[in-house]
């Protein structure tokens, strides 16, 4: 258990550092109000999650240590949006279309409300 947690932590550190660097890069030249850095990071994170997850499954290398390092750690540190996207898609592909839409809608609505509430309470 400790080794898996350490692997996830290392992957998370690398993913977080990559997210930080990409964000800083975009802040240096992107001046429009659209949050391009976060948008690009989320899309890249989803792509990385799909590529790594698919490759690990297809190659038979899907082991707890690699999963902790690359999927949970790196992709989780890079963006949690990738996990949300994967879970939403998996639910739909497994025939749970209603649950998938419910998960998406509740996550977005309650996430925005929770953020707003946190901002109100902390100000």
Image: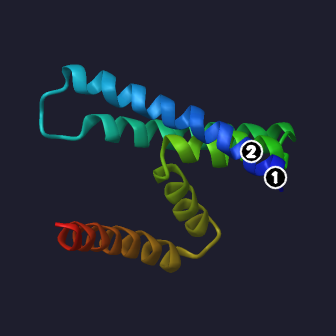
Residue at (22, 66) in percent of width and height? 119
Please state if 74 lies on the left or on the right of 64 as rendered: left
Residues at badges 1 and 2 in contact (C-beta under 8 Å)? yes
Query: Quarter-wise, where is residue 94 in the image?
Result: bottom right
Q: Is residue 29 visible?
A: yes
Picture coordinates of residue 96, whole percent (x, y): 58, 76
Towards the viewer: 76 or 84: 76
Q: Tell me if mark 1 has few (under 14), some (14-19) or many (20+) residues whose alpha carbon lies within 10 angstroms of its own.
A: few
Q: Find the residue positioned furthest to the left.
A: 32
User: Which residue is painted at 12% across and 33% down in the image?
Assistant: 32
* Alpha carbon distance from label 1 to label 2: 6 Å
| Residue 73 percent coordinates (x, y) | 64, 44
In this rendering, position of residue 60 left or right of residue 89: right
Q: In the picture shown, does residue 71 fall above or below 107?
A: above
**Does 103 appear above or below 83?**
below
Say which residue label 2 marks. Answer: 6
- Give residue 4's position: percent from left, percent from top: 79, 49
Residue at 84% from the left image edge and 36% from the top image edge: 59
Looking at the rendering, in which quadrant would you find the N terminus?
bottom right
Residue 51 figure quarter: top right
Residue picked out by circle 1 = 2
């Amino acid at each position: 258990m400790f080794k898996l947690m350490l692997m996830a932590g290392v992957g998370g550190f690398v993913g977080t550092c990559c997210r930080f660097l990409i964000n800083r890069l975009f802040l240096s030249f992107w001046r429009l109000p659209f949050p391009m850095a976060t948008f690009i990071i989320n899309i890249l994170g989803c792509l990385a999650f799909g590529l790594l997850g698919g490759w690990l499954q297809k190659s038979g290398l899907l082991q707890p240590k690699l999963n902790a390092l690359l999927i949970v750690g790196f992709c989780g540190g890079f963006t949690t949006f990738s996990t949300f996207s994967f879970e939403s898609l998996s639910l739909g592909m497994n025939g749970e279309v209603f649950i998938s839409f419910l998960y998406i809608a509740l996550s977005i609505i309650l996430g925005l409300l929770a953020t707003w509430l946190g901002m109100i309470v902390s100000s």
